Image (cartoon, grey):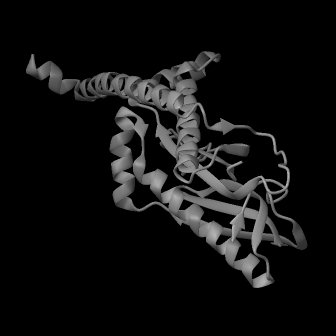
Amino acid sequence: MLEIVLQNLDLVIFLALMVIGYTAGSIAEKRHYASIEQRERELLRLMLVNASGSYPDGRVKSAFLVSGSAVISVDYFKRFLAMLRNLFGGRVRAYESLLDRSRREAILRMKEEARAKGAVMIMNMRLETSTIGTSDTSKNGIGCVETLAYGTAVVLNPQ
Amino acid sequence: MILTNIGSVPGKKIVEHFGIVSGSTVRAKHVGRDMMAGLKNLVGGELKGYTELLQESRNEATERMVAQARMLGGNAVINIRFATSSVAQGAAELFAYGTAVRIE
């Protein structure tokens, strides 16, 4: 029995990594989604628009830039799934949740910063996504994305 | 110094334009953080080291842009945009640009 394990050590390690990646990864993702949804509900009252508007004179107390960013990576299991997907093409669900999580997290952080500074709304929100440290040609790159959300927070004068 | 990413400063009047100002930094991650990220990569989730690193570098790029605007005599930067590009394996460039203006 031990001999078989030792002979196929590569395979055993690979399977172990898959199992660790799958279990820990899905638990972490579920927790993250729960926290995102809860904070999104809390911050629902803070208006967020991606149009730039103007206010009548004397209404605005101050305006400033706020931003939030998050770097999220996929687990080992999902990376393997995505690699398989590459053979057949089609929708890569494993990466959809990755991007979704990092965008929502970045927006939430931006909103939290705006709320801490007393803003009532954020105008002209922009989102930017980039992969860091990896190029398209490298195989052993880290499968992670960075999302940056930024906008102009507005504090109003009391009427 | 007031920073906005819209074409004006809400509630203020722009009296003078100074043109484009920009700032950038190229940062590489360090080995310790990279190893931690490698481990974290197994289970997925947020790579806090990288988030902090990028935030720091972006602040620095913004600082440089602000310094340039101040040199020109502006007291606000409007229409700010951020851009990120990876230059080489393990290094990223953070770039911030905007229009320097003077407001009342």
Q: Quadrant of residue A27?
A: top left
- Residue B12: x and y in percent read 82, 63
Name which residue lies at 48% across and 39% down: A72
Task: Name the residue: 80% across, 58% down.
Answer: B11
| Residue A6 location (% of width, % of height) | 16, 27
Quarter of the image where the N terminus of chain B is located: bottom right
Q: Nearer the viewer, residue A77 or A154?
A: A154
Q: Position of residue A67 (x, y in %)?
A: 60, 51
Q: Is residue A146 visible?
A: no
Q: Is residue A56 visible?
A: yes
B38 is higher (above) or lower (below) than B76: above
Q: In the rendered image, which quarter is residue A22 located in?
A: top left
| Percent position of residue A114, x then y | 58, 49
Relative height, residue B66 to residue A30 (above, below): below
Q: Is residue A22 left or right of residue A84?
A: left
State the quadrant of the C terminus of chain B: bottom right
- Looking at the image, residue B28 sits to the left or right of residue B43; the answer is right
- Residue B48 shown left or right of residue A115 in the figure: left
Nearest the viewer among B35 and A120 is: A120
